[in-house]
Amino acid sequence: MPPSFDHDALFKRLLTAFFREFLALFAPELAAELSAEPLIFLDKESFSELLEPDRREADLVVQAQLGARAATLLIHLEHQAQRDAQLDRRMFRYFARLYDRYDTPIYPIALCSYPRPRRAVADRHQLHLPGSTVLDFHFRVIQLNRLDWRAFLQTNNPVAVALMARMQIAATERWRVKAAALRLLVGIGLTGAQRRLIAQFVELYLPLKGAEEQAFQAEVATFSTQEKEIVMEFETSWERKGRVKGRAEGRAEGRAEGRVKGRAEGQRLLIEQQLAHKFGPLPEEQTAQLARLRPAQLKALSVALLEFAQPAELRAWLEAHPAPPPSDPEVS
């Protein structure tokens, strides 16, 4: 996974799309009390000054209604892609600031998605003075690396299917988790776009190669016809085109180099497809720029585009990450 990989952006996209499902999975008692009123995701600009500068893109603050009580509350979800020894203190500070700003109950949740360390994260922040406990603040912690992916093999929750890719997985089981996640997608009523979002999440966190990929493909061969259709939907034309091109270039230039170029071509085609879906057909100049991006740049763009809302953001990204000139041997 490239160093520039934006975990927060990918998690935010998943959780925004399936926030009720996330609550049903990890805070079922709260989910059961929420009304059917639409959830309101507060614009980060409305609370960004309350957070630390490096966390402003990582948090979700969601306004919800409690059905039976006809009351409003805010759900603050903090995503942690890396361990932070000060998490408990920061969760309290954010709670206090949000509570003071909005004067409404706050439900705080910390979602820890890093693979290591696996020791339990503190779920409270306390302040003791002689003879008194001045503060005893609790928040909900979901620590994925302490959850066994096998416990979710019967789930119909799309968030569980996606997050299996970040749970406790033995090195020899990565291909099994990927196969199980794709198989579970068959039984969940999702739109094509929702299914692709989950499949992309799993693919990004569980890339396979060599013996892993062979074991995965052997498992897929045992799928039912319907299950295989899901995998085929996941392996869209951009991947197949890249694979075909890789084989052709492999014959002419050597298998390894051809496969690398084929994967890059497949990724470029996917990015073009995603951008065209967001903004319509791309200008020829941008298509040419994409064709010259290095593989590492393509990987970075594949995550960055998840947050693009306007064509101007794509233009700004391309200006900030200029493609090598056509004569550059890396892209020729």
Image (spheres, rainbow, N blue to C red):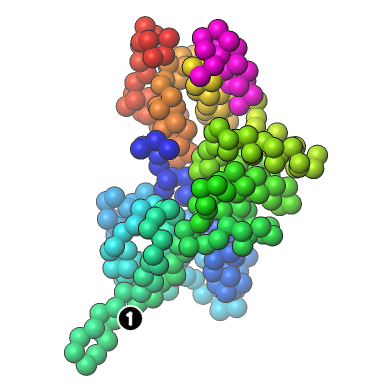
Q: Is residue 275 visible?
A: yes
Which residue range is magenta in the image? 239-256
Residue in the picture at 29% in, 81% down = 135
Label 1 Cα crowd, 10 Å radius (few <14 / some 14-19 / many 20+): few
Left or right: residue 308 compared with residue 30? left
254 falls in the magenta region: yes
Residue in the picture at 41% in, 21% down = 294
- Identity, as a three-letter code, of the amino acid under mark 1: Asp
- Residue 207, position in %: x, y? 53, 38
Pick whichever, 103 or 90, lies toward us. Answer: 90
Secondary structure mostly seen in the magenta stretch: helix
Pick whichever, 233 or 118, lies toward us. Answer: 118
Q: Residue under circle 1?
A: 136
- Residue 36, position in %: x, y? 63, 65
Does residue 116 lie above or below 274 as drawn?
below
Q: Is residue 269 visible?
A: no
